[in-house]
Structure formats: C-alpha cells, structure tokens
Image (spheres, helix red, strand yellow):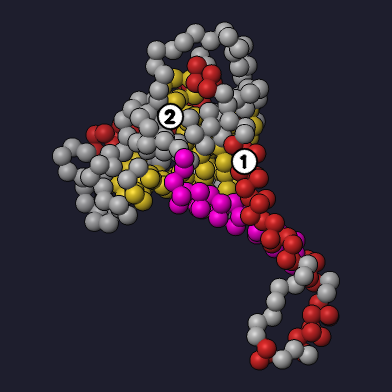
Amino acid sequence: MAPAWLQFLERGLLAGSLAWHAISALRKRRNKHASLNAHHKRGRDDTRGPRHSSPDSAPALSALPKAALDAIAQLKALAGAPEVLEWPDVAAAPSASMDMSAVAEGQATAFHDGRGSIYKFKLSEGVYVNMYTTKAGYRRSGDLHDCNQYDIVLRGRTRLRMIDPHTGREVVQEYGPNDFIVIPARTPHMFEFLEDNCLLEWWDGPFQAWYYQPYRSIIEKGLALPLAATQAADLSTSPPAAGALPSKKAKHGAAPGTGAGAGGGEGGDAEAVVAVAAAGGKAAAGGAAAPVAAAAATH
C-alpha cells in the first residue's frame, strides 16, 4: 500500500492540474455575467461577510476530487502484464543505488555528471522523492518499473516516449512546465529533453528497474545522437506471443526501494561524480561516491 503522504500528494497534484483547466473554463463563463456581478457588488453590504462562490462554479469544483481519482485509476489500469519483464529486450538493471543509509530524514544526496544532477530526498525511511536537472539535448530513463511512476515538469520542455506494453506501439508526447505525467507500471519509457529541464519524480510502490535495451542503446550514445535524429522515428515493437517467452534467470531489477530514479543517469558521460549531503554540501565519506556513480549509471 502506498504511504499516506504519497496518496495525498498524488491526489493533490492531479486535483491541482484539473482545477487549473476547470477554473480557466469557468472564468470564461463568468465573463458572460459581468454586468450582473457588478450590480450585485454595488448592492452588497460588505459587513455581511465574504461573498460566496458563483453557483455556476460550485458543481464543477466539487467534482474535481472524484475526477482526479478516476483519472489516476484509469491510467494505472494501463499497466503492462508481469510477462513484460520477460521480453527479450528487457534486462534486469544493476542493483546499485544512491546510498541513503547515512542520510537523515529531511536530507538528500546528489549525483552530478555532464547531463545535470540527481537529488534524492529522504522524506522518511523508505520514502523518497527525486529531482533531476538535465541539459537540453540529453536523454534519460530507458527502463521500466514494477510500479507506477509520477513526474511533474518544473522547468523546460521534454519529449516522453513510451512503449504500450499491450500492443508494442510507441506513444510520443511532449510536456512543459507544470505538466503532470503518469507512467503505468511495466511500461518502457525514455525522456528526451528539448530544453534545459527540471523534473520531480516518485513512485507508488517499492522501486525496481529493468532496462529496455532499444531505448538504452539510444541513451548511451549521448550527444553523439542528436534529438533531431529520433524526432520522427517510430520505435514501436512487436510483443512476444503469449506463452512464447522463456523464463529468465534474472527475475528482479534494482533492489526494492533503493533506485536512484527512472530519470537518472544513462552512463558514458560521467564528467564528475559527487555524493553530497544537501544540507551540509560535504562530500560523502568512506568511498560513497563509487556506489552513487554506479547507481546513476543504472538509471
């Protein structure tokens, strides 16, 4: 079961996004009644207390929480079957991770390389939120998880590629600031950053990662393969027929709850590896940089 804070955040973020669109529509409707509202204001006694919301807005606003919950439920229902983890192009990711054992609650560690930075915040034991800054032209992810993933674009535009785990068809969508993204469980995905970008990311269950090799092979080329080279590409695939998949020895990806994050490093471009405590800014002691580097290269 997802932690209570995550459920609250999940609902709040979705409600906020839907509210923005609903309020924009309601503003247009209220403009039609501008003269009536003006007359109402002139005749209103301010000592009687605050004015109530327009009758037109009340039904729409009261429906937002249910609409948000319905939307998230529909997206979760698109999760791929467990057999997706047995696809020939899917391989277990290394189990290394950003080491959080010495990080206090409310603090973070960070990983830096040529692409940007990963900040992993420890809200409480086993509960983490990641923030990624990425320079334009780079890619991240190229993996899939055994749980649902959520992202908010805080800055810059990004192109998200996903492989429908049911049909193999590739779905490509661009997102910008304040857009909310849901990636259903067991859905291969890859971010292509069109502008300098900042993403906030978390998951609704124990984190595990598997590589999706067609995307990973692109990511590992770094800037040598410009985004323009894949802009019009169709990377759809043909899922294996049911019952035709041999059992793989490596059943599990990165250890549950320890992943650096789906938007993390892609390997082959680590110019600087620094493990720091966000509060003090000091380098982690005892050779901690090595596992952090491995973790970032994993994701």
Of helix, strand and loop, which one carries label 2? strand
Viewer-side label of 2, 1:
1
Quadrant in the picture for residue 238: top right
**Residue 73 tag number:** 1
Q: Which residues are magenta?
A: 1-27
- Reading the image, the residue beneath label 2 is 209
Residue 132 image position (x, y, % from top left): 43, 46
Q: Is residue 19 magenta?
A: yes
Which residue is located at x 69 percent, y 80 percent? 51
User: Are the two marked residues, 2 and 1, in contact with CB atoms closer than 8 angstroms?
Assistant: no
Of helix, strand and loop, which one carries label 1? helix
Q: Is residue 35 above or below residue 32?
A: below
Could you tell me how far apart the alpha carbons at marks 2 and 1 are, in whole angstroms? 22 Å
Q: Is residue 288 above or below residue 67?
A: above
Residue 272 in sight from this viewpoint:
no
Mark 1 Cα shell of 10 Å, populated few (<14), some (14-19), many (≥20): few
Q: Quadrant of the C terminus?
A: top left
Residue 140 image position (x, y, % from top left): 47, 36
Quadrant in the picture for residue 37: bottom right
- Of residues 3 and 15, the one nearer the viewer is 3
Q: Would you say the magenta stretch is mainly helix, strand or loop?
A: helix
Q: Earlier in the sequence, mark 2 or mark 1?
A: 1
| Furthest residue toward left | 286
Residue 228 image position (x, y, % from top left): 58, 34
Which residue is located at x 46 percent, y 43 percent? 2
**Residue 203 tag number:** none
> What amino acid type should be assigned to the residue bearing mark 2?
Ala
Q: Is residue 276 above or below residue 213?
A: below
- Does 292 sit left or right of 178 as displayed? left
Which residue is located at x 53 percent, y 10 percent? 245
